[in-house]
Amino acid sequence: MKTVFLFSGQGSQYPAMGKELFEAFPEKAREIIDAADSTFDFDLWSIIQNGTAEELSQTRISQPAIFTVSLLALAAAEEKGIAFDGVAGHSLGEYAAMVASGILSLKDGYTAIKHRSTAMDKAAKAAPGAMAAVIGLPAEKVVEVCERIKAAGDYVTAVNFNSPVQTVIAGTEEGISKASEAAKEAGARRAMPLAVSAAFHSDLMASAAEEFKEAVKDMNFNTPKVKFYSNVIGSELTDFSDMPSLMAKHICSPVKFTDELNAMKNDGFDCYIELGPGKVLTGLVGKTLKDVRAVNIENTDTLNAALAL
């Protein structure tokens, strides 16, 4: 069995996530929370455990919160001896993947998340946008719909290629509304608005990308100890010579997750373990790949299920 660890993206957060893992592995958990405490000027763990869903949905909170719970799940998996030969993350999840693979230290991972969440929150307020998941329409048809709406004057673009039956679009509210209707007319089963107030991975995040690149330009990046798969290129990343530029590009470039999954399968990975809140990526694996195992780890019950594989 060849295992790849997958890390959850923004939108997977929920109140009191990670509590069981924190209590089951207190020593490693304390190390993670201490790193968060030394990075942020607010009590992140208290907000994760006691905050409302609305509070947790704020970009400056949700990104470090999901990152933290993903690392708690990683620590639990490693403590139990689950080995892995590759990593990948969906959008925000790439940062937990960088820590897991050794590209970034725990402290630098939190620093990068702080800069990213702050820059993206600022860009979202300056240029509000929206996102929607188009279900049941081939990705190339979704792209065609977006291009048609954009040519007519409303900005919208395909940003997350999640599975053969799900593509997320981002843009202005008007662009999303028109593209959603056009997608349904073209045969989509539905176009589901996402609970965000920004157009992530689109040109509306360009200012965030610039600010972020400047903030992390002097950060130390290491060569990963396992295979690292990239959203930007949709395959294994082998050139780590200019990570600040790649990470900045990642903020306003599409997430080629379907291509990544196929690349992993072609590289022999047959066990996919999602680490962090929720099991969205586990579902995407099931919709994209055949003859593989996919599970998630977000609490002690799911940890035990993963150990039984």
Image (cartoon, rainbow, N blue to C red):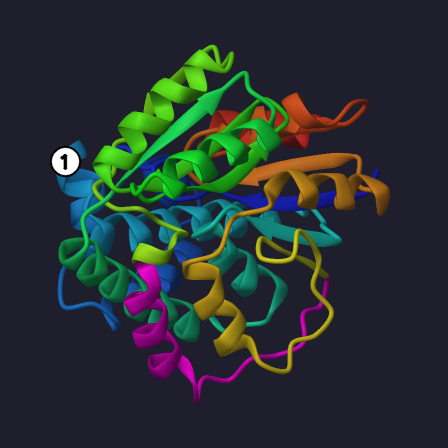
Magenta segment includes 225:
yes
Would you place residue 245 above or below residue 227 in this image?
below
The residue nearer to you, when weighing 70 against 88, is: 88
| Residue 123 position within the rendered picture, expressed as x and y whole percent measured from the top left | 22, 60
| Residue 293 position within the rendered picture, expressed as x and y whole percent measured from the top left | 73, 27
Circle 1: is it few (<14), some (14-19), or many (20+) Cα within 10 Å?
few
> Residue, x 70% and y 74% (percent of image)?
239
> Residue, x 22% and y 36% (percent of image)?
173
Asked whether, in this view, residue 33 is left or right of residue 213, the answer is: left
Would you place residue 63 above or below residue 307 in this image?
below
Magenta segment includes 28:
no
| Residue 25 position within the rendered picture, expressed as x and y whole percent measured from the top left | 44, 47
Q: Secondary structure at mark 1?
A: helix
Would you place residue 3 above or below residue 301 in this image?
below
Task: Identify the residue under disc 1.
Answer: 54
Quarter of the image containing the C terminus? top right
Quarter of the image containing the N terminus? top right
Q: Amino acid at mark 1?
A: Glu
Which residue range is magenta in the image?
A: 205-226
Work out which residue is located at the far front of the displayed protein and give it. 152
Q: Is residue 16 visible?
A: no
